[in-house]
Image (spheres, helix red, strand yellow):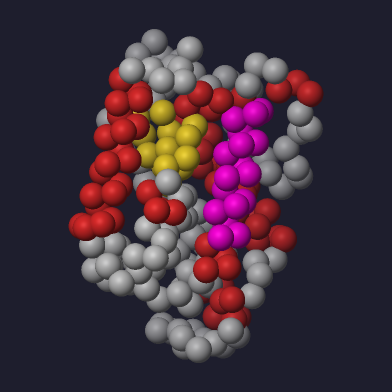
Amino acid sequence: MSKPACSVLPQPPTATLTVYAADHATEDFVAAGFLTRPYPEDNPIPYTNLSPRREMVWEAEARKAIKSVASQFRGRDGSARAGPAILWRTLHHPPRHNYAPFPRVFALDSLARKLIADLQAEAHPDHAHLPAPKAGAATGEDDEDLGLDERLRVDMSGALMLGQEHHFRDLLHPEAVPGSYLWGDVLLYELKRAVEKVGRS
């Protein structure tokens, strides 16, 4: 299974983090003997559930990616807590659903939202009553306060693209309208929130 990848918009006061698994069906196709693309569109392989092992690997890698971004992008005072907002962009469906089929996109989106909630709760000052992260979900960081309870938010632009699969310029990237327009609108909204310090102490 491919590791999550992240894209970051590095200028303050906000950073966007997109952790995705565009090839989360590739491992299954290759294991079944399909070694080259394009993979068959009528094959049920990618519509099966992801194994718990792969979900744990994905969650651990996503956790490390988020914490790495939070540690790298700091505030003007040098502290991570004062760093820019981090937006987790939800997944969208490309036209070829056998590369990113609905069941797996929904499963990974649910897992991501749970991870975001866990990281926010763990970073909250009152988190002492929470259970420790599960085995396999190593943080990859020390105990530095990354401020994820205030910095980490969900960017809904990917989820809002549901049903727009016929407005794509290739197998992965949406056309400027509605895709780029929608994403830009969300970023402007989040920039406004960041400048006005909405949700920040």
Image: 82 above or below 142: above
Q: Which residues are magenta?
A: 106-122
Residue situated in front as seen by the camera: 30 or 120: 120
Does 26 appear above or below 155?
Answer: below
Q: Who is closer to the viewer here, 74 or 120?
A: 120
- The picture quadrant where one finds residue 93 is bottom left
Q: Is residue 142 above or below residue 188?
A: above
Q: Position of residue 31 (x, y in %)?
A: 60, 80
Q: Is residue 178 visible?
A: yes
* 126 sits left or right of 166 in the view: right
The residue at 56%/60% (across/down) is 106
- Which residue sits at x=50%, y=53%? 4
User: Residue 135: image x %, image y %?
Assistant: 76, 44
Question: Which quarter of the figure has residue 17?
Answer: top left
Say if the magenta span includes residue 119: yes
Residue drawn at x 39%, y 10% as measured from the top left: 77
Q: Residue at x 30, y 26 (%)?
A: 192
